[in-house]
């Protein structure tokens, strides 16, 4: 027999494994082995078993099998292989999220010392203690040292005497998790409404992935809770993914009343490597019933995975932006298929990808069109910022300030959504509502305020600078306004206007650890704060019953980026916004925007989600954009990215023409890379084929990219 082994040491050129002969060892897929590599021994993971040697070289033999049971289950390895194939990485790269950094032997279960009888000859046994030990061991295969110490107060000296006479032998064994542990994981049951119960039942019956399309406040979390309990009672485990580490703090609240805290593992990137290792082993042993975490929690080594839930399925954070550049949704779909587990994707605003799959039957779909207890959706007001006279209050319009004041008077709470942190200020024409763009990159210029000097424009992708124009280059209007405001500026203005109000600011600066999020949430729940001011990523998803006003200060963020997903993203944001308000009593929502008639803004304000999704899907089909076509991005970095990207595009185009493919290839600087990166975007029906035969060593491949500006 032969096996393919991914070695832990990172030697170049063997990212897809080396072939070894198994020799006399019994080797299973997923085993950790020690193998010779060059002149040394190294550890490796067995990823494939083969009858014949597929290598053209003479192969060496496996030296030792280190694991008693496979480190990774077959379904997990199959998923890693799928990731390597789909995202065009090596198998080693695809395995990285599953197995944290080597040495992998650290992940083997801890083994305990114990004893068994080797020779039943009692004539060699001396003294009461030795007799007691022998009687205790008789008829049992193996007893741990711990148990002997506990029951008979046995010391090492007693045992050594027996060991020396070769009456007993010592052996290290992995102590398996108690097979009945799952019976005491659950501590409180959800009580579903009949509509919710029907949805839960019909999802459980269908083996396909399910899209749970329920309006904000419809009780999706309660349905998850029911399905998690059912899974655990069947002796299996569940993984729940949330879009953002900080939101694990919010969700854990609900799950702690459902399961014992020690049955839940929260996985996020702020864990120390030591804490992560301990959790990894507990999960692998089967002690953990449910893992809650951000996208990488999908790779938790659950021994009997029964359910994966992706909450807020549409969120961009489910895409990993480093190799392997996987999407948690597609990877979860694959993992569930190989593990026989159920996948549930929950959202109030399905992604286009999920929507198209629900429409063509690849996903089963369940709708929850009403809020829990038929609580009304909030009233939504759109404020056209082009008509507002801000005075010194930019970016607050008078109606928004009035509404905040009214809520403060009634002792209700307010949530304000802000731009993503770091989104730059740009120069907007209030007449034609376009942004002033750089002739170099065609992306909006950033307005820079200098200390003392005059403000100027800068194109971060090319370094081009320009003076602030007096007139709009498109329509010649003089009504130009620098728009965009960060959290700090907004906090300052609010503080001046409402000195009595207790303000909380939540952005990546004030909130870097889940503990800080916990404190902020309890301050809001306990009424110790009046206004929560936060970036979208922090504020979305919160369930705070006393919030009756939610507002977005500037809904246009990202709108002027030439991004085919910009509309979808704004729609999701605004729907999230409406979801924060009036969850327990009538609420309102205010949207401040420079584009009051944009279709996504109108649809969100009217709660017309399906109409918007269908319309947007038609548009994508008409313009040949995903999800109706494939997309692939090549990222070019380091020296002369522009020159290299341009010349690579020419080569690529020749390949596309020669193969007769329906693929377009374009290159441009990336907005996200700040000018130091260029990307080549391929769009069409066989984008991977277009790469055939090309040397890809100098580019980073991103399959199904999200950041495509
Ligand atoms: P979603 O995730 O769909 O936005 P949630 O699950 O957060 O909705 O539910 C909204 C609110 O309604 C929560 O405060 C939740 O506790 C409550 N709720 C929903 N369904 C039930 C139920 N069956 N029993 C008790 N409370 C419920
Ligand atoms: Zn103009």
Image (cartoon, helix red, strand yellow):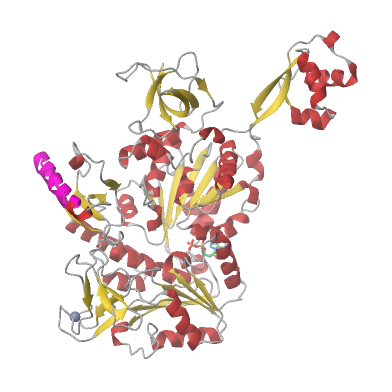
Q: Is residue 344 above or below residue 27?
A: below
Where in the figure is residue 556, as x and y percent of width and height? Answer: 31, 73
Q: Is residue 179 above or below residue 294?
A: above
In reply to whether residue 659 is colored magenta, the answer given is yes
Of all residues, the one furthest to the right in this rendering is: 128
From the image, which quarter does the N terminus lie in?
Answer: top left
Magenta stretch: dominant SS?
helix
From the image, which quarter does the C terminus lie in?
Answer: bottom left
Where in the figure is residue 567, as x and y percent of width and height? Answer: 29, 66
Quarter-wise, where is residue 451 in the image? bottom left
Q: Is residue 501 above or below residue 537?
A: below
Can see residue 314?
A: no
Residue range in magenta is 644-665
Tell me which residue sits at (73%, 19%) in the image: 116
Q: Nearer the viewer, residue 537 or 154?
A: 154
Q: Nearer the viewer, residue 424 or 534?
A: 424
In reply to whether residue 426 is colored magenta, the answer given is no
Where in the figure is residue 20, as x and y percent of width and height? Answer: 40, 20
């Amino acid at each position: 027999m032969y096996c393919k082994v991914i070695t832990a040491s990172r030697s170049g050129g063997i990212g897809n494994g080396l072939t070894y002969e198994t020799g006399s060892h019994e080797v299973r897929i997923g085993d950790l082995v020690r193998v010779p590599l060059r002149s040394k021994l190294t550890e490796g993971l067995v990823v494939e078993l083969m009858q014949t040697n597929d290598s053209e070289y003479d192969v060496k033999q496996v030296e030792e099998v280190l694991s008693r049971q496979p480190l990774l289950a077959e379904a997990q390895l199959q998923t890693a292989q799928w990731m390597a194939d789909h995202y065009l990485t090596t198998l080693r790269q695809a395995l990285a999220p599953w197995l944290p950094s080597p040495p992998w032997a650290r992940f083997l279960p801890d083994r305990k010392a114990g004893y068994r009888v080797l020779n039943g000859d009692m004539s060699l046994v001396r003294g009461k203690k030795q007799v007691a030990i022998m009687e205790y061991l008789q008829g049992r295969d193996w007893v741990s040292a711990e148990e002997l110490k506990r029951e008979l107060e046995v010391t090492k000296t007693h045992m050594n005497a027996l060991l020396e006479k070769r009456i007993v032998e010592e052996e290290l064994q992995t102590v398996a998790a108690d097979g009945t542990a799952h019976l005491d994981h659950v501590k409180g049951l959800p009580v579903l409404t009949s509509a919710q119960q029907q949805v839960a039942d019909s999802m459980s019956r269908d083996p396909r992935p399910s899209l749970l399309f329920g309006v904000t406040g419809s009780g999706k979390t309660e349905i998850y809770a029911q399905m998690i309990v059912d899974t655990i009672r069947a002796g299996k485990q569940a993984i729940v993914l949330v879009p953002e580490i900080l939101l694990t703090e919010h969700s854990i609240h609900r799950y702690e009343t459902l399961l014992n805290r020690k049955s839940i593992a929260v996985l996020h990137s702020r864990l120390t490597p030591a804490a992560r290792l301990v959790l990894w082993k507990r999960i692998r042993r089967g002690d953990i019933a449910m893992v809650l975490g951000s996208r990488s929690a999908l790779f938790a080594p659950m021994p009997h995975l029964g359910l994966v839930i992706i909450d807020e399925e549409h969120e961009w954070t489910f895409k990993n932006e480093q190799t392997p550049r996987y999407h948690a949704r597609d990877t979860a779909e694959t993992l569930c298929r190989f593990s026989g587990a159920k996948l549930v994707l929950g959202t109030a605003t399905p992604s286009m990808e999920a929507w198209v799959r629900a429409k063509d039957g690849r996903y089963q779909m369940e709708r929850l069109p009403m809020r829990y207890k038929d609580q009304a959706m909030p009233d939504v007001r759109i404020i056209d910022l082009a008509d507002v006279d801000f005075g010194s209050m930019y970016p607050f319009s008078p109606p928004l300030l009035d509404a905040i004041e009214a809520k403060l008077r009634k002792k209700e709470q307010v949530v304000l959504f802000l731009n993503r942190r770091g989104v730059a200020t740009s120069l907007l024409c209030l007449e034609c509502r376009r942004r002033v763009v750089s002739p170099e990159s065609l992306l909006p210029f950033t307005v820079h305020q200098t200390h003392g000097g005059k403000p100027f424009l800068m194109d971060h992708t090319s370094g081009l600078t320009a003076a602030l124009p007096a007139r709009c280059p498109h329509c010649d209007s003089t009504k130009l306004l620098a728009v965009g405001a960060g959290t700090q500026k907004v906090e300052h203005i609010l503080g001046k206007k409402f000195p009595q109000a207790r303000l909380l600011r939540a952005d990546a600066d004030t909130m870097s650890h889940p503990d800080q999020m916990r404190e902020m949430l309890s301050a809001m729940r306990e009424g110790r704060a009046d206004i929560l001011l936060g970036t979208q990523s922090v504020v979305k998803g919160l369930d705070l019953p006393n919030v009756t006003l939610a507002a977005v200060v500037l809904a246009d963020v990202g709108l002027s980026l030439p991004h085919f997903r910009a509309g979808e993203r704004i729609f999701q944001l605004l729907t999230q916004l409406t979801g924060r308000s009036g969850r327990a009593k009538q609420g309102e929502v205010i949207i401040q925007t420079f584009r009051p008639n944009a279709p996504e803004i109108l649809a969100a304000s009217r709660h017309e989600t399906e109409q918007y999704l269908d319309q947007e899907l038609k548009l994508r089909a008409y313009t040949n954009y995903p999800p109706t076509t494939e997309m692939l991005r090549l990222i070019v970095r380091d020296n002369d990215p522009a020159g290299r990207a341009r010349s690579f595009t020419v080569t690529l185009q020749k390949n596309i023409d020669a193969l007769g493919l329906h693929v377009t290839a374009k290159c441009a600087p990336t907005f996200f890379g700040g000018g130091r990166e260029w990307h080549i975007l391929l769009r069409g029906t066989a984008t991977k084929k277009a790469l055939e035969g090309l040397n890809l060593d100098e580019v980073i491949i991103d399959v199904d990219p999200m950041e495509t500006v």
